[in-house]
Amino acid sequence: MARAHRTAGHSGRPSESIAPPDAAPSQRIDRFLWFARLTGNRSAAQALAERGIVRLNGRRVERAHTPVRRGDLLTLPLGNAVRVIRIVELPGRRGPAPEARTHYELIEQGDGNAGFSA
């Protein structure tokens, strides 16, 4: 007799997220870079994250699945310069460029609001 396949967890209830209930929503860094149009495709976003040249809130990122959240600072090479951006909102899709630019703000060198508050 074949065993019935259950789609729920071991307890018979639908599976729940393992994140704490008070945790802020997050998104994989490679997905954010691609959705925000900071890279041309998802593979390029994954490669950029795994090369270890992107920093998230000052810490080196070496995994494409590293989570980013609203308010995080990303330091990454864009074109021929290193840019610092603050995540304003997590995008839900890869939309047109004007829409993508609304999800982050570019922090200019010497900008007084770029620092962390104590």
Image (cartoon, rainbow, N blue to C red):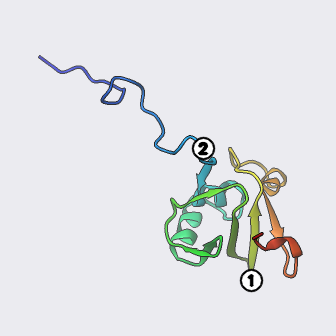
Q: Nearer the viewer, residue 78 or 16?
A: 16
Q: Residues within 10 Å of mark 1 (few under 14, many from 20)?
A: few
Q: Nearer the viewer, residue 28 or 57?
A: 57
Q: In the rendered view, does 71 fall on the left or right side of 106?
A: left
Per the image, the residue denoted by label 2 is 22
Residue found at x 59% / y 75%: 59
- The mark that comes first in sequence, 2 or 1, is 2
Residue found at x 75% / y 51%: 89
Percent from the top left, x then y, of residue 2? 15, 19
Q: In the rendered view, does 107 fall on the left or right side of 50?
A: right
Q: Nearer the viewer, residue 104 or 14?
A: 14
Residue found at x 59% / y 64%: 45
SS class, disc 2: loop
Q: Residues within 10 Å of mark 2 (few under 14, many from 20)?
A: few
In the image, is residue 110 above or below residue 86? below
Q: Residue furthest top?
A: 1
Per the image, the residue denoted by label 1 is 80
Question: Disc 2 to disc 1, how far (Cα)?
Answer: 39 Å
Q: Quadrant of residue 85?
A: bottom right
Percent from the top left, x then y, of residue 83? 75, 76
Percent from the top left, x then y, of residue 52? 54, 77
Residue type at tag 2: Asp
SS class, disc 1: loop
Q: Nearer the viewer, residue 47 or 23?
A: 23
User: Which is more foreground, mark 2 or mark 1?
Assistant: 2
Percent from the top left, x then y, of residue 73? 71, 67
Q: Residue furthest front?
A: 118
